[in-house]
Image: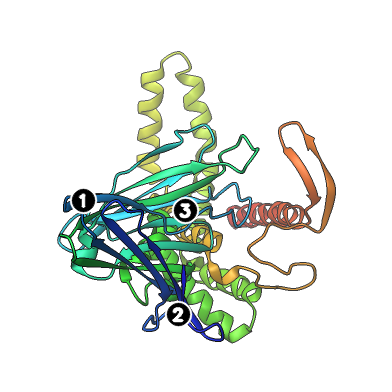
Amino acid sequence: MELIGTEAEPRGVEFRLNPGTGVELVKRFELAEDSISGWEFDLTLTLTGTGGAKSGPRQFVLTPGAVVPRALNDTFYREPRAIAAGPVGDDEPDYEQEEVSPSGDRTGGLDAQGPLAFVGTHNKYFAFLLRGRDQASSTSLIGARYRQVAEVGQQDYEYVLGEALVQLSLPAEGQSQSWNYRIYAGPKDLDILVLDEPALGQVTDGDLSWFSGIGKLLLGVLRTLEKVTGNFGWAIILMTFCIRALLFPLNRRSQTSMARYQSKMKRVQPKIDAIKKKYANDRAELNKAQQKLMQEEGIFPPLGGCLPIFIQMPIFFGLFSALRTSFDLRQAPFMGYIQDLSRPDALLPWDAGFSLPMVGEIVSFNLLPIIMVIMWVLQQAKAKCRRATMVLE
């Protein structure tokens, strides 16, 4: 091992292996000075033929990040994950990620085909991703696999590694050849991750799932509101009000249509009861008579009654996915005892938790879910009173 630079200003380290088998391997690892994000490292592999070994292809395994821990014990986000991406079309990469599972296979292949766009491991907030710096180096990344590992003395394989399968060509005696790679080792921030390589953005796209477009839009709005309020907690509240305000006309129209429909149904209910009594033993005539009555009275269920729900579902699913994995919320304080918006509510944590049937392990007293249930009950009661008022009007 040899230091690159000086002890006062080190730039990296170089490893040299010459076991006397006709091959010398040099691995050079140093900070990427031209990296825009500032979170990248350069890795250079050099093979030299020293005589006695036949030139030709040799296969190696590169591990960008070894034993990436969990960021949080989040049941909604399985971590850590192994990931690999390869080209599908001319310039569009596809990617495959593996979730760690103690009951699953200890090792296996990742489906992404070489030459790989990148391969590595990531958890909820950080990623360690390897890619080639030039055409020859990218072509050497012929495939990827994952491997699960456990701590010494432990039975649970709770860690997973994403490994690159690399094929290098040993040159003839006295000749050398080098391959250049770059490793991103930093936060899964939407803006930072793609500065040096846009393809790395697929990592966060995968976290946002089907709603990546909506999630990115909402995160952009959230960041803008944070600049206004100076706090992500108030920004989330303000964004929620904005979304509700935008959807209010649609919700109001749907509620009004439903109230009119219920009012008409209440008016013709005695006629419906009379028809049910008259054709109690004839289901076909009952349905025909009811349909005729509805047509004569001009009563039809409002077609837009479910429209607000279908419009809101993608928005709130996208918002949930965005807030669940947003690096911006990591260690972001709100107020009072809430000092990390990325973590679950825990007003009074207990050192020794206990379990309840149908609930699971209880490790803290959580105030926010109780407030949420109370607010939901009050909201439903208010909505019920509003509908009753509309019907009476």
- How many numbered circles are shown? 3
Closer to the chain start, of discs 1 and 2, is 2
Label 1 environment density (alpha carbons within 10 Å; few <14, some 14–19, many ≥20): some
Q: Position of residue 270 (x, y in %)?
A: 54, 34
Closer to the chain start, of discs 3 and 2, is 2
Which quarter of the figure has residue 36? bottom left
Which residue is identified by label 2? 38
- Do callouts 1 and 3 mark residues in contact (Cβ within 8 Å)? no
Callout 2: helix, strand or loop? loop
Inter-mark Cα distance, 1 to 3: 68 Å
Inter-mark Cα distance, 1 to 2: 40 Å
Q: Residue type at mark 2: give it.
A: Gly
Which quarter of the figure has residue 308? bottom left
Q: Is residue 311 visible?
A: no
Q: Position of residue 162 (x, y in %)?
A: 41, 51
Visual colour scheme: rainbow
Label 2 environment density (alpha carbons within 10 Å; few <14, some 14–19, many ≥20): some
Q: Residue type at mark 3: give it.
A: Ile
Which residue is identified by label 1? 53
Camera-nearest residue between 143 and 239: 143
Q: Which mark is residue 309?
A: 3
